[in-house]
Amino acid sequence: MSHIVHMIVNKIAEDLNTALITNVSSSDPARAAWVKAYRFQDSPKKYPIYVSVVPGNPDEPTLEHGRIDIGEDLERLGIYIPSGEVGGGHLWWRRGRIKIGCFLLDEGYEEDEAADVAQTVLGRVEYYAERINVSSLVDDYGERAHGNVFIFASNFFEGGGPDDKYIWRGEVRWQVLTQRPL
């Protein structure tokens, strides 16, 4: 059995793997080394540019899944849709993060060069994530995803380290509109 959130996370990871690794020249310094669903649990020395797709965020309640008609922190669609009407099911925002790490430690970059590589990775993630169509996904409970992945926020920052070692980390926040049947 499968749940819609698991299906969405896997679809995003699969499509980003193609966009960030398969379709990028091996000589491109901003080519990802690793893209997968769920946690990154390996060495950033082995995979210096990694991307992981995860649902929600336990540290931030505004990234919870929820019905679009309930909750102050859940974005409204801007139109009136009786999302909880009898027989109509419920519309939900399913949310998560695409976590990015760029551990540019052995490349010999100047800071500006490292920043350019890292920001290129961020730009690619944002660009390709919004083009992922999830409307073919329907889980075992009848919940159906609609349209494309929406990117609604991102953050990306340079971390500490020696002068010739550059670490950039951050995340792109996504949401997908789904409909749950009654």
Image: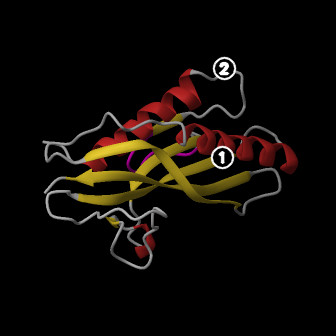
Seen from the viewer's position, the closer of residues 116 and 63 is 63
Residue type at mark 1: give it. Leu
Residue occupying image coordinates x 45% and y 75%: 73
- Horizontally, residue 40 falls left or right of residue 89, namely right
Choose the circle earlier in sequence order: 2 or 1: 2
Q: Is residue 68 above or below residue 144?
A: below
Residue 145: percent from left, percent from top = 32, 45
Reading the image, the residue beneath label 1 is: 122
Q: Quadrant of residue 147?
A: top left
Q: Decide if residue 40 is in sight here.
A: no
Confirm whether the magenta stretch covers residue 42. yes
Q: Decide if residue 47 is in sight here.
A: yes
Residue type at mark 2: give it. Ser
Per the rendered image, the range of residues in magenta is: 36-44
Q: Is residue 30 above or below residue 167?
A: above
Residue occupying image coordinates x 42% and y 32%: 14
Q: Is residue 25 above or below residue 117?
A: above
